[in-house]
Amino acid sequence: MIVYLNGEFLPLAEARVSVLDRGFLFGDGVYEVIPVYAGRLFRLQEHLHRLENSLKGIKLQNPLMEKQWVKILESIVSRNNGGDQAIYLQITRGPAKRDHNFPENIVPTVFVMTDPITVLPPSNGVKAITRVDTRWQHCDIKSISLLANILLRRQAIETGGVETILIRDGNAMEGAASNIFIVEKGIAITPPKSQFILPGITRDLILEAMQSAEMPCQEATISENQLRSADEIWITSSTREILPVIRLDDKVVGKGKPGQIWSQVLHIYQTYKQTLYG
Ligand code: PDD
């Protein structure tokens, strides 16, 4: 695999960063995951826009212009043979003497790698659990400090599930690494954007696609009770697309199989993706 690190393209095994990097010492950085289909970066502008907001959120100036980002990302895609990939990019505040207070003139570390993305087979549905959202108050920043998320996700894995849906003040917010939708009385509902959820690119695309197909959908608070009595629950992300949840904790969701609206929305999503393959 060819990666990008601070101005250079090089094999992964040769990429080195300082142990004083604030990403390593403090988790002081932000990231993006961008899917690539047929060699094309999917929703690139939206990902770069969110990256800009994350950087603002941690008071770090974007070290690259948009044009430079596009060039680097396209180059990583082609140097790794195009096709379907998931690009991971990370910017940390860079190496400096360890101090909670960050110095002003420090050079950020910019790293880009890629992973193969497997086109998911049609899902039979997955299990999710619920837990209290133990994360901080800036979940709209795509921070590399993910300790709470990984511990919460781990609890799902340990109980045979794939995702943990997070409850804050009696409301369902999102998954440990995904957004959520429920279907209630035929209407798809997803929580409104706020500091408590990551503004998911997949989430926005689903809303956009449903609106243009004139399918009922809305952004509204989802109470824990609504989540538990929903006819359908979906989790959405760039790498998992739209997954139907058929068991939540120890209860069946809806009819215990992927719902009809999920299947329609997945179809629209896949058709949209297919346009990239040309
Ligand atoms: N995570 N919420 C959280 C907390 C996430 O970590 C993610 C994605 C999402 C979905 O966002 P998007 O649709 O833009 O992928 C929501 C990525 C995939 C990750 O951390 O690997």
Image (spheres, rainbow, N blue to C red):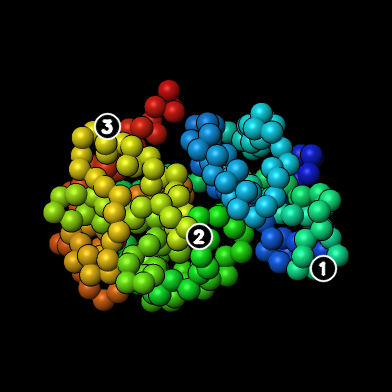
Q: Secondary structure at mark 1?
A: loop
Q: Residue at x 80, y 68 (%)?
A: 99
The three-letter code of the residue at mark 3 reads Ser
User: Does residue 211 appear in this view?
Assistant: yes
Which quarter of the rendering shows the N terminus? top right
Q: In this figure, which residue is indicated by the disc labeled 2?
A: 139
Task: Indicate whether 94 appears above or below 263.
Answer: below
The quarter of the rendered structure image containing the C terminus is top left
Q: Is residue 33 left or right of residue 211?
A: right
Q: Which residue is mark 1?
A: 98
**Mark 2 close to ligand 1, CB under 8 Å:** yes
Query: Residue 3, can we see it?
Result: no
Q: Secondary structure at mark 2?
A: loop
Q: Which residue is mark 3?
A: 212
Q: Amino acid at mark 1?
A: Arg
Residue 65 horizontal/vertical position (percent): 69, 33
Alpha carbon of mark 2 to alpha carbon of mark 1: how far?
25 Å
How would you rate the neighbour count of disc 1 (Cα within 10 Å): few for under 14, some for 14-19, many for 20 or more?
Answer: few
Give the residue displayed 76% in from the left and 45% down from the top: 5
Q: Residue at x 54, y 44 (%)?
A: 50
Q: Is label 3 or label 2 in front? A: 2
Up/down of 132 relative to 125, above or below: below
Question: Which residue is found at the position 77% from the left and 50% from the top?
Answer: 108
Q: Nearer the viewer, residue 63 or 38?
A: 63
